[in-house]
């Protein structure tokens, strides 16, 4: 299995191209199910999860054709076509490996009036139930049955009649599933307390490009007037705000200066506010965000929250950065109950972190030290890369497949700005 080796202490300087957003890509790809015409997605990141999602869609008879941009370029173009849906079942073997598979439930139900999807089960960062996905679909008129580890949703008469659902807590995934189910309903579907993440806006914009009628895009109330059919479209995936935030933390911890090309400051407000408070200089270009370290890092008090709050997907990376701040920081994770798996690994590198319930106190240390480490999820793995870039000596990050799920050509991007980083195989 591959590992990443980092010899820390190099200052990062230069430009980093930001890829298309993983979390947007995985909700845009299932939109292809909603029409028999082609959906062409541009700026798709080259990631293991995108490939896996393509294979899942192939199971339903959706064809996926990737046009290679040159191997030295980032991103790619994929044309997906669900000319005919040949199966409406998402099997356990695929769903268990990729939670985002649950996002086929809404569109399959909308297009074919029925969908059977394996329950995703637990995962490394917590319980992650799907009850809100099912309740929203039920409110729109779906009948839901759960048997033998599978959810079967069906629309009586083949079309969802519409209805209203108010989320008790904000859920990104459930908002996405409900939206994709709603666009082909025979009535009006209203979602209250819907997620407002930029990836939801991206999904809405793509659905509108396919002919959907959605009011309130970007707000917590979404009103969808169902259409008889949607048509094909060409749509460019938004830039990855989490990837950009991760590289911002990497630049900051090394005392460097990087330009995040393609990043949109307006979608990163909470992360940039945190970096600003830590003493980092931020400037916004026409199509980029620049980060410049400015002396010692200041400690922060941060809490994750649904958008426009601080993304739970940035918690681990900010924590890594704060391990070397001048003083004690407090981080509170409000979205997932078990998202501190990086803490013991950071501690192995010399970090001083105490977790009590949902909060972590990070007392800044002068220097982190390289060590062999591994993490059990994507963002936790990135936090170890960030710590390794600043650590003295060599850090070996194992279980690289987590990083390959979410960071396009990580080591290439980091070495181009001066990091001493390489991927090594077993052999
Ligand atoms: C969440 C994050 C998203 C991040 C992704 C991957 C939020 C609001 N969502 O999205 O930013 O990119 O993880 O790390 O920050 N919940 C239920 N029942 C459900 C669905 C969710 O109780 O049916 C709960 C979850 O346990 C969690 C909260 O609602 O506490 C938000 O979950 P949700 O937004 O659905 O998770 P993801 O879509 O995976």
Image: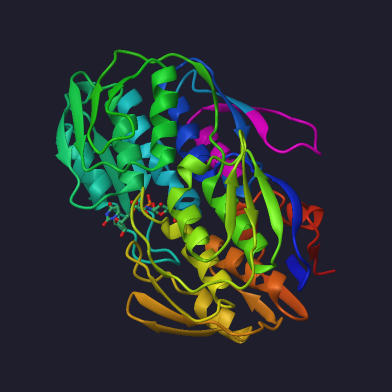
Q: Is residue 66 magenta?
A: yes
Residue at (57%, 70%) from the top-left corner? Answer: 321
As rendered, which of 401 and 55 lies closer to the eye?
401
**Quadrant of the image where one finds ligand 1:** bottom left
Q: Position of residue 92 (x, y in %)?
A: 43, 51
Q: Determine whether, in the image, residue 144 is placed left or right of residue 89.
A: left
Residue 261, quarter of the rendered image: top right
Residue at (54%, 69%) from the top-left corner? Answer: 376
Q: Position of residue 180 (x, y in %)?
A: 34, 31
Q: Determine whether, in the image, residue 16 is placed left or right of residue 124.
A: right
Residue at (18%, 51%) from the top-left corner? Answer: 168
Q: Is residue 347 magenta?
A: no
As rendered, which of 312 and 120 lies closer to the eye?
312
* Figure colour scheme: rainbow
Number of dots carrying numbers: 0
Query: Quick one: which residue is furthest to the right in this view?
Result: 427
Q: Determine whether, in the image, residue 417 is placed left or right of residue 283.
A: right
Q: Determine whether, in the image, residue 39 is placed left or right of residue 143.
A: right
Q: Position of residue 121 (x, y in %)?
A: 37, 60
Residue at (35%, 46%) from the top-left corner? Answer: 172
| Residue 357, visible in the rendered structure | yes
In the image, residue 111 above or below residue 369? above
- Of the 4 image quadrants, the one containing the N terminus is bottom right
Question: Which region is colored magenta?
Answer: 50-77
Q: Position of residue 373 (x, y in %)?
A: 65, 77
| Residue 86, visible in the rendered structure | no
As rendered, which of 180 and 244 lies closer to the eye?
244
- Of the 4 image quadrants, the one containing the C terminus is bottom right
């Amino acid at each position: 299995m591959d590992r990443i080796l980092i010899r820390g202490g190099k200052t990062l300087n230069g430009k980093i191209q930001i890829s298309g957003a993983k979390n947007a890509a995985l909700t845009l790809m299932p939109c292809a199910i909603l029409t028999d015409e082609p959906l062409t997605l541009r700026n798709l990141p080259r990631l293991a999860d995108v490939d896996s999602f393509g294979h899942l869609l192939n199971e339903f008879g959706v064809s996926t054709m990737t046009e290679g941009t040159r191997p030295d370029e980032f991103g790619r173009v994929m044309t997906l076509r669900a000319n005919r849906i040949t199966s409406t079942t998402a099997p356990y073997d695929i769903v268990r490996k990729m939670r985002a598979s649950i996002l086929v439930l809404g569109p399959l139900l909308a297009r074919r009036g029925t969908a059977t999807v394996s329950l995703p089960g637990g995962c490394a960062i917590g319980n992650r139930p799907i009850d809100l996905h099912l309740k929203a679909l039920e409110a729109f008129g779906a009948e839901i049955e759960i048997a033998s580890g599978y959810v079967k949703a069906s629309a009586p008469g083949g079309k969802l009649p519409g209805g209203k659902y108010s989320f008790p807590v904000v859920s990104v995934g459930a908002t996405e599933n409900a939206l994709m189910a709603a666009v082909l309903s025979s009535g009006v579907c209203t979602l209250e307390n819907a997620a407002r993440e930029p990836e939801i806006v991206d999904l809405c914009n793509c659905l509108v490009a396919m002919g959907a009628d959605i009011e309130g895009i970007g707000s917590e109330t979404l009103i969808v007037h169902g259409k008889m059919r949607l048509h094909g479209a060409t749509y460019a995936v938004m830039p990855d705000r989490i990837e950009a935030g991760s590289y911002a933390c990497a630049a900051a911890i090394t005392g460097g200066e990087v330009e995040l090309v393609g990043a949109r400051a307006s979608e990163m407000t909470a992360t940039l506010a945190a970096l600003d408070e830590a003493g980092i200089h931020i400037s916004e270009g026409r199509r980029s965000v620049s980060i410049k370290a400015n002396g010692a890092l200041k400690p922060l008090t941060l809490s994750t929250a649904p958008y426009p709050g601080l993304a739970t997907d940035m918690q681990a990376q900010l924590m890594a950065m704060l391990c070397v701040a001048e003083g004690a920081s407090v981080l509170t994770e409000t979205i997932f109950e078990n998202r501190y798996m990086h803490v013991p690994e950071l501690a192995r590198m010399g970090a001083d972190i105490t977790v009590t319930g949902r909060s972590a106190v990070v007392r800044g240390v002068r220097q982190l030290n390289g060590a062999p480490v591994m993490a059990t999820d994507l963002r936790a793995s990135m936090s170890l890369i960030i710590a390794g870039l600043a650590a003295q000596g060599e850090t070996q990050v194992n279980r690289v497949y987590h990083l390959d799920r979410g960071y396009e050509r990580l080591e290439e991007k980091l070495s181009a700005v001066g990091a001493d980083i390489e991927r090594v195989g077993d052999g």
